[in-house]
Amino acid sequence: MILLPAIAAGLLAGLARARYRNGHLKSPDLSLVWLVPIAFLPQWLAFNLPLTRRLTTDNLAAAALVSSQALLLMFAWFNRKRPGFWALGIGLALNLTAIALNGGFMPVSPEVVTELLPDSPSVTWQIGERVGWNIVLPITDTRLWWLSDHLLLPAWFPVRKALSIGDVLIAVGAFWFLWALGGPEQEEEKRSSE
């Protein structure tokens, strides 16, 4: 996913910025941080942990994904005065919209799936079926297809993934927030008071 490289790059940029100004990386002052692990838990159980992934029905997995996105959006809203959180929140809202309008999963077109999984006999998929947290839908059957996972990472990137516009905004917001932690204290105080 693009979020992990954005977080790593944001931390490195924030550290470099702090070092350049002979300061230090500020500790993040965020509200409702406890929402983040609570938001990720349903996704992790429904999509990542092998035992619970096998036992999770499509309806339950869709509910887990929608509720996770809603909780993360709430976290972003309560931190909207922090640098980067508007981009992060808009990205989450766009993803939640695409997911909610397409049966509780992020839509991906057959063309993108074919690009991601070229000619692999061990991997099978069909239109209308779930592939991870995506659902394979033709563009003509996808509501707001331009919000779907239709952007492919470049071939030189170590992992082949499809992204949405929301994913890109979330990554930009995370990078921006972490970069700002290396800035002067008065910038943060000024933004917090506005």
Image (cartoon, rainbow, N blue to C red):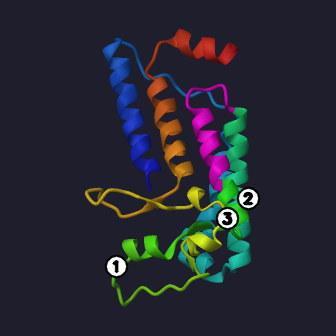
Report how far apart the C-alphas of labels 1 and 2 lie in the structure.
32 Å
Of the 4 image quadrants, the one containing the N terminus is bottom left
Residue plotted at (72% across, 62% down):
100
| Residue receiving disc 1 | 118
Q: Is residue 32 left or right of residue 167?
A: right
Visible residue check, residue 134:
no
**Placement of 160 over or under 80, stated as above or below:** below
- Secondary structure beneath disc 2? helix
- 1 or 2: tag closer to the N-terminus: 2
Q: Is residue 83 left or right of residue 112?
A: right
| Residue receiving disc 3 | 143
- 2 or 3: tag closer to the N-terminus: 2
**Placement of 62 over or under 77, stated as above or below:** below
**Placement of 25 over or under 87, stated as above or below:** above
Q: Is residue 94 one of those drawn in magenta? A: yes
Are the two marked residues, 1 and 3, in contact with CB atoms closer than 8 angstroms?
no
Q: Is residue 100 one of those drawn in magenta? A: no
Percent across and percent down for residue 9 are: 37, 38
Q: Is residue 74 left or right of residue 168?
A: right
Report how far apart the C-alphas of labels 2 and 3 lie in the structure.
20 Å
Residue plotted at (41% across, 35% down):
10
Q: Which mark is residue 67?
A: 2
Label 2 amino acid?
Answer: Ser
- Viewer-proximal residue among 111 and 72: 111
- 1 or 3: tag closer to the N-terminus: 1
Are the two marked residues, 2 and 3, in contact with CB atoms closer than 8 angstroms?
no
Label 3 amino acid?
Answer: Arg
Crowd rating for badge 2 (residues with CA inside 10 Å; few <14, some 14–19, many 20+) = some
Visible residue check, residue 2:
yes
Q: Is residue 96 left or right of residue 110?
A: right
Residue plotted at (55% across, 9% down):
186
